[in-house]
Image (tube, rainbow, N blue to C red):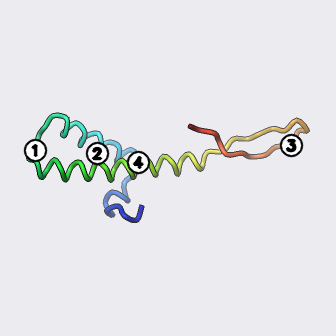
Amino acid sequence: MADLPPDIAALGFEDALAELDRIVRQLEEGRGKLDESIAAYERGAQLKRHCAAKLEEARAKVDRIVLGSDGTVSVASADIA
């Protein structure tokens, strides 16, 4: 995420998603001038990338406990798709 602006990289998932939602609504409504819309679209793309990376980080942290047939306990990565 090094290619993201620092203000986006500092956002948590929920805040980034809320801003992305606001940008999408603004673009759908056609508010703003062309240059502003292009800048908003580019920021939205960066926010989307940031949100996707945050989700992947969370997915990688989710593990599940597995109880083997012999009674042994182990941890396996969650199969979240």
Report, in whole angstroms, how far the alpha carbon at label 2 lies from the one at label 3.
46 Å
Q: Residue 18: x, y in percent?
A: 31, 42
Q: Which residue bears the numbered disc 2?
A: 19
Q: Is tag 2's residue or tag 3's residue first in the polypeptide sequence? A: 2
Q: As drawn, is 67 to the left or to the right of 25?
A: right
Note whether 13 is above or below 29 in the view shown: below
> Three-letter amino acid code at disc 4?
Cys
Most distant residue in the left direction: 33
> Three-letter amino acid code at disc 3?
Thr
Q: As drawn, is 27 to the left or to the right of 65?
A: left
Q: Is tag 1's residue or tag 3's residue first in the polypeptide sequence? A: 1
* Cβ atoms under marks 2 and 3 closer than 8 Å: no
Sort mark 1 into few (<14), some (14-19) or many (20+) by Cα contacts within 10 Å.
few
> Three-letter amino acid code at disc 1?
Gly
Sort mark 3 into few (<14), some (14-19) or many (20+) by Cα contacts within 10 Å.
few
Q: Nearer the viewer, mark 2 or mark 1?
A: 1
The image's mark for residue 32 is 1
Q: Residue drawn 10% across and 44% down?
A: 32
Report, in whole angstroms, how far the alpha carbon at label 1 lies from the one at label 3.
61 Å
Q: Is tag 2's residue or tag 1's residue first in the polypeptide sequence? A: 2
Q: Which residue bears the numbered disc 4?
A: 51
Note whether 1 is above or below 35 in the view shown: below
Q: Which residue bears the numbered disc 3?
A: 72
Report, in whole angstroms, how far the alpha carbon at label 4 lies from the one at label 1.
25 Å
Q: Residue drawn 91% across and 38% down?
A: 70
Q: Is tag 4's residue or tag 3's residue first in the polypeptide sequence? A: 4
Q: Secondary structure at mark 4?
A: helix
Sort mark 4 into few (<14), some (14-19) or many (20+) by Cα contacts within 10 Å.
many
Report, in whole angstroms, how far the alpha carbon at label 2 lies from the one at label 1.
16 Å
The image's mark for residue 22 is none
Q: Nearer the viewer, mark 4 or mark 3?
A: 4
